[in-house]
């Protein structure tokens, strides 16, 4: 069995604890190595931060096929996360968001700017995100081909945890657009069927904000994980409302997200 290497950012807040706990939960079905990371502003902080991380590790229960090690660096979350992805051959990054209060915050920084700095998937959690079995994964797609970048990753997660996928899209009154989204759904469903993944399809009603309809569907179906591809042409991606709304959703569901512009052949 190949090893999965997770990078978990911790800022010594309950949000960091939620990220670590969720990473440990993810590792229960795989051979995993967790790199627990704290970035500091100067070398004088390294010893203290290392001691605090090691204490967190000592207090964290995990399976025998999971290892956790501490990493403390002088650095910046915007640039050093991407560097560590290459250095440690990271498969997945788990980070916590402090929520959207005015400007979106993630470890005191803008979430989407961090997510778009790397080509590997993220799982974003919030303070009250609880580790739970992944049995139902929501995968929303749209008319943009980039939205399909998350399909394989969601399928990988579904296979690992024995989950079913709920593939959702918006209905369209325009016949051409309606047929286009239906064709896209059929292609994705065939991909999942070929992998023996249960795929449920739902076309959401016309009207209203797409992210609100998605969250209502999550409540109705008791979804465990949202999985999306981030794609936007916005000059300032941190202001993209759809992705922002899902990673800071009021139900505090974890959200797997990948930057579709950098994603190529990544796997989870």
Image (cartoon, rainbow, N blue to C red):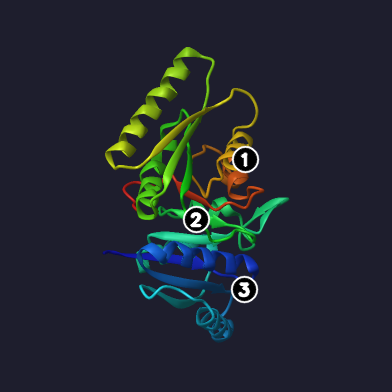
Q: Residue 12 carries which label?
A: 3
In three-dimensional space, the C-alpha distance between marks 2 and 1, rounded to whole angstroms, equals 18 Å
Could you tell me if residue 228 is visible in this image? no
In the displayed structure image, the side of residue 199 where residue 99 appears, left or right: right
Confirm or deny contact between disc 3 and disc 1 (CB under 8 A). Answer: no
Structural crowding at the residue carrying mark 3, measured as other residues with C-alpha within 10 Å and reported as few (<14), some (14–19) or many (≥20): some
Q: Residue furthest top?
A: 175
Give SS at disc 1.
helix
Structural crowding at the residue carrying mark 1, measured as other residues with C-alpha within 10 Å and reported as few (<14), some (14–19) or many (≥20): few
Give SS at disc 2.
strand
In three-dimensional space, the C-alpha distance between marks 3 and 1, rounded to whole angstroms, equals 28 Å
Q: Mark 2 points at which residue?
A: 123
Q: Earlier in the sequence, mark 2 or mark 1?
A: 2
Q: Residue furthest right?
A: 102
Q: Nearer the viewer, residue 267 or 223?
A: 223
Image coords of residue 18 (percent x, y): 58, 65
Task: Quadrant for the C terminus, please.
Answer: bottom left
Q: Nearer the viewer, residue 115 or 233?
A: 115
Image coords of residue 44 (percent x, y): 58, 85
Give SS at disc 3.
loop
Residue plotted at (49% across, 76% down):
61
> Which circle, 3 or 1, is nearer the viewer?
3
Confirm or deny contact between disc 2 and disc 1 (CB under 8 A). Answer: no
Q: Mark 1 points at which residue?
A: 241
Q: Which of marks 3 and 1 is nearer the N terminus?
A: 3
Q: Which of 79 and 38 is in front in this view?
A: 38
Would you place residue 97 above or below residue 201 in this image? below
Structural crowding at the residue carrying mark 2, measured as other residues with C-alpha within 10 Å and reported as few (<14), some (14–19) or many (≥20): many
Residue plotted at (61% across, 34% down):
213
Q: How many marks?
A: 3
In three-dimensional space, the C-alpha distance between marks 3 and 2, rounded to whole angstroms, equals 18 Å
Q: Which of marks 3 and 2 is nearer the N terminus?
A: 3
């Amino acid at each position: 069995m190949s090893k999965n290497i997770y990078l978990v950012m911790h800022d010594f807040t309950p949000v960091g604890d939620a990220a670590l706990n969720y990473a440990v939960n993810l590792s229960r079905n795989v051979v995993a190595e967790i790199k627990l990371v704290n970035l500091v502003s100067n070398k004088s902080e390294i010893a203290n931060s290392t001691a605090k991380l090691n204490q967190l590790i000592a207090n964290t229960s995990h399976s025998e096929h999971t290892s956790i090690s501490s990493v403390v660096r002088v650095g910046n979350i915007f640039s050093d996360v991407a560097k560590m992805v290459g250095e440690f051959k990271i498969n997945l990054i788990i980070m916590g968001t402090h929520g959207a209060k005015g400007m979106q915050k993630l470890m005191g920084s803008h979430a989407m700017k961090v997510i778009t700095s790397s080509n590997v998937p993220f799982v974003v959690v919030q303070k009250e995100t609880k580790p739970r079995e992944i049995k139902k994964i929501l995968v929303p797609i749209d008319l943009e081909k980039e939205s399909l970048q998350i399909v394989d990753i969601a399928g990988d997660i579904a296979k690992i945890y024995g989950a079913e996928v709920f593939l959702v899209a918006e209905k369209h009154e325009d016949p051409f657009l309606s047929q286009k989204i239906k064709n896209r759904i059929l292609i994705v469903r065939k991909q999942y069927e070929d992998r023996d993944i249960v795929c449920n399809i739902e076309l959401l009603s016309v009207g209203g904000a797409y992210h609100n309809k998605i969250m209502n569907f999550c409540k109705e179906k008791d979804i465990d994980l949202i999985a999306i591809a981030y794609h936007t042409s916005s000059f300032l991606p941190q202001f993209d409302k759809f992705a922002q709304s899902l990673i800071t959703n009021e139900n505090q569901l974890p959200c797997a997200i990948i930057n579709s512009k950098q994603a190529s052949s990544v796997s989870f």
